[in-house]
Image: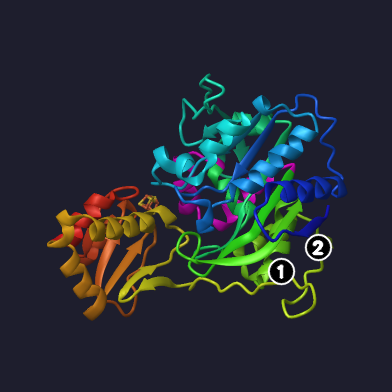
Amino acid sequence: MSVKVVEAKKYSVKSLERLIGSAVKELGLDLQNRTKRTAVLKPNIVIPAKPSSAIITHPAVVEATISVLEENGFETRNITIAEGSGLGADESRVFEVSGYSELAARKGVNLVNLNSLNNSLNNSLNNSLKKAERTELRWKYGVLKIPKIVLDADLYVNLPKMKTHGQTVVTLSMKNQKGLLLNSDKKRFHNLGLHEPLVELAKVVKPDLVVVDGVEGMEGEGPLNGKKKRVGVLVLGTNLLEVDTACCEIMGVKPESVEHIRAGRKQKIGPAKLNLFGVKVKEEKEEGGVKKKFKQANKKYGNILNVYSWRNPYACSMCIDSFSLAVKTGVRSPKYWLRFVPRFSYYALFKRLDVIQGKHAKIPEQHGKVICLGDCTREIAKKNNLTHIKGCPPNPHDILEALSK
Ligand code: SF4
């Protein structure tokens, strides 16, 4: 096993295609001798976001990968882009806003919404509806339902974005696989503690190829609220742990500080020694150095002014994303201007709000008004007589109503 790091300064499909094509050969991956020549590509499209936001895998990287497959005899009708976006994301807009609907229609590949149990978004060229059927796999925690198309494909390509993450330090190929799960299993993942389940998932679902979009990454309060970071690389490999470790080196993150990487090493899901080739992973100040120090997310909380959201590995990110969406909606909708905005601004500027979420949530030592988000915090809210907003994840309108009172 080995990892190749290639310099890729911009999202030019032609040059990305050339880089991916030659890296695949150097990795020794034989694309020609595939019996069925069916492929599933799994980018990270966690929410409806534009490619320029650096929140999602840029469609140009996926398009270049499709072209490499075409060169190797894969027909586009046998290639599928599949993603199950984050809990609570607006499903109807995910593929449109991100540019993937347009890409699928133009290239004639299938586009499957893995969150939709009985149907898929089909492209305009291929008008047949396909099911995102699931196959049951046994894993450490019982049974896991994985999309059949991924398990049946001749080639499964995992295409994550290079980002920091408030709960897992980084989000790369191991974390990207969470998008393969049903929403109920995504929630269960958090209830099981997130890090160990990521390792267990990596044991039962293994990609043939990983292509990390590090042309532009995201640093700071990722996976959604960080800043764009230009890195100028693609990282390719065949082992999840090895690729993620290499990305950490590039991002200036100690791999051992990432709990799921530490657990993966302990369980030997990747090689003991990192075998890197391609451009040297040297410090940025050195000639040709590709290392870029990523600012990490605050480990305990994220805050804007005096509004603190407390991190908890047992909490799904979509609980707090619903809260962010509620605030954005409140600020933009005139109907909330009189009720919500003055009250929220008062707390944000002159007082303090502390939002807690997830199973085992704790009340912070120092706090202002505590808001308990989601069904997981029902008990703690009841016991301490705190404001509770129900839902799993809570509905942004319920959050707005609660904050307007
Ligand atoms: S309430 Fe929130 S944290 Fe708890 S399972 Fe539901 S979405 Fe996840």
Residue 234 x %, y %: 71, 56
What SS does tag 1 mark? Answer: helix
Residue 260 in view in this figure: no
Residue 376: image quadrant is bottom left
Q: Is mark 1 within 8 Å of ligand 1?
A: no
- Left or right of 345? Residue 284 is right
Q: Could you tell whether 255 is left or right of 129 in the image?
A: right
Question: What crowding class fits label 2: few (fewer than 14 Cα within 10 Å), some (14-19), or many (20 or more)?
Answer: some
Q: Which residue is depicted at the point 50% across and 57% down?
A: 53
Q: Is residue 32 visible?
A: yes
Q: CA distance from mark 1 to mark 2?
A: 10 Å
- Pick the front one: 67 or 385: 67
Q: Amino acid at mark 2?
A: Leu
Contact, mark 1 vs mark 2 (Cβ under 8 Å): yes
In the shown orientation, is residue 358 left or right of residue 145?
Answer: left
- Looking at the image, is 184 positioned above or below residue 235? above
Specify the quadrant that holds the C terminus: bottom left
Q: Nearer the viewer, mark 1 or mark 2?
A: 1
Front-most of residues 238 and 50 = 50
Magenta stretch: dominant SS?
A: helix
Q: Position of residue 123 (x, y in %)?
A: 53, 28
Q: Amino acid at mark 1?
A: Glu
Q: Total number of numbered labels?
A: 2
Q: Residue at x 56, y 31 (%)?
A: 105
The residue carrying mark 1 is 249
Which region of the structure is painted magenta?
180-208
Q: Nearer the viewer, residue 40 or 317?
A: 40
Spot occupied by residue 59 in the image (x, y as percentages of width and height): 59, 46
CB at mark 2 closer than 8 A to ligand 1? Answer: no
**Which residue is tagged 2?**
274
11 sits left or right of 274 in the view: left
